[in-house]
Amino acid sequence: MIRIGIYGYGNIARGVECAVRQNPDMTLAAIFTRREPKTVKTVFGETPVFRADEVTAHADDIDVMILCGGSATDLPVQTPQLAKYFNVIDSFDTHARIAEHFANVDAAAKEGGKTAVISVGWDPGLFSLNHLYAAAILPDGRDYTFWGRGVSQGHSDAIRRIDGVADARQYTVPVPEALKAVRAGEDPELTTRQKHTRECFVVAEPGADKARIEREIKEMPNYFADYDTTVTFVTQEELDRDHAGLPHQGFVIRSGVTGRDGEHKHIVEYSLKLDSIPEFTASVLLAYARAAYRLNRSGDIGCKTVLDIAPSLLSPKTGADLIEYLL
């Protein structure tokens, strides 16, 4: 059995707690939180909860630690720290900083003789893989990624960290004309702003400067500065009533040509439609936790991404079973 630990207890962590039960080769050994453990109500109430500052004392009790913090401020610090003591998986999704994050985690994991897999999820993650496959098959072509309409947890978290914000939801919305042109094989050149818009619903704290909050959102680098962004202030009751769910969807499209003169067009499309981003992300994290466990047992240490890992390592089935089942 692969002994799983959870570090940070929020939406993704609750998804991990549920998903472990769907993986018969895994067991949930412990949950670590910055809150007072006795105040944390877990989904099933069966797994022991410990303080986050006690985590290294449990290094021998956990095979893979799933880090469930946010990308804005948690994971850049937590993943390198914990990769010295545990095999770790995170869902770091700030695309512009992944190379920097990789280098920091790689050094820490190698120091501790551990295996880390970063930026696991759907994007980055499964979408990254499908870009790679399609581009390798159709080298003469162009890649497109469209997200939404759906809630971005990372962007919502970034808004909530702004001073004066009590709560927030951010929706990523594809520009319909751009998506239509790509699917038609028109091969358009699109800027970031031409592909998506961002809609933010924000609950401000009493007395907060709403104009400043809106400005900080729209000017936030790596999150909103490159997009047409609308900010709507709502009450907590309105947010809870109208924006409680966490759905999302997205599309990876590769448009390419083959033939002597490029006369034949091809479209490769991979899509996801998700009722719950955190629960789906949690399921992806666990599949890569299995891979990290196997890699570490074979002596393959350091930091990895989804691009480095053989697909067969994700499955609980044996190689022989996979050949019979899938080929």
Image (cartoon, grey):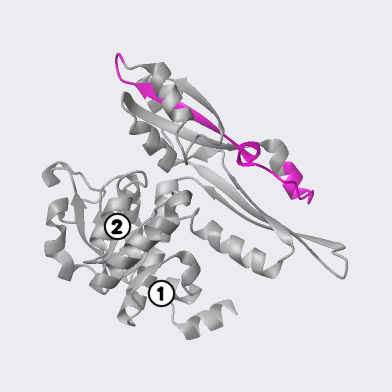
Stretch of the chain drawn in magenta: 180-207
Graded by Cα atoms within 10 Å as few (under 14), some (14 to 19) or many (20 or more), the crowding at tag 1 reads some
- Circle 1: element type: loop
* Amino acid type for the residue under numbered disc 1: Pro
Q: On the image, which quarter does residue 36 sit in?
A: top left
User: What residue sits 69% from the left and 69% below the top?
Assistant: 137
Q: Nearer the viewer, residue 251 or 302?
A: 302
On the rendered image, what quadrant is the N terminus found in? Answer: bottom left
| Residue 242 visible in image | no
- Above or below, 314 against 131 in this view is below
The disc labelled 2 sits on which kind of residue?
A: Thr
Residue at disc 2, secondary structure: helix
Q: Residue 273's x, y, as percent? A: 55, 48
The x and y percentages for residue 161 are 33, 33
The answer to which of marks 1 and 2 sits earlier in the sequence is: 2
From the viewer's perspective, is 270 left or right of 32? right
Q: Which mark is residue 316?
A: 1
User: Which mark lies nearer to you, 1 or 2?
Assistant: 2
Left or right side of 313 for 25 = left
Q: Where's the C terminus, which quadrant? A: bottom right
Residue at the bottom extreme, as displayed: 320
The numbered mark at residue 79 is 2
Residue plotted at (45% across, 24% down):
215
Instruction: Check if residue 206 falls in the magenta segment.
Output: yes
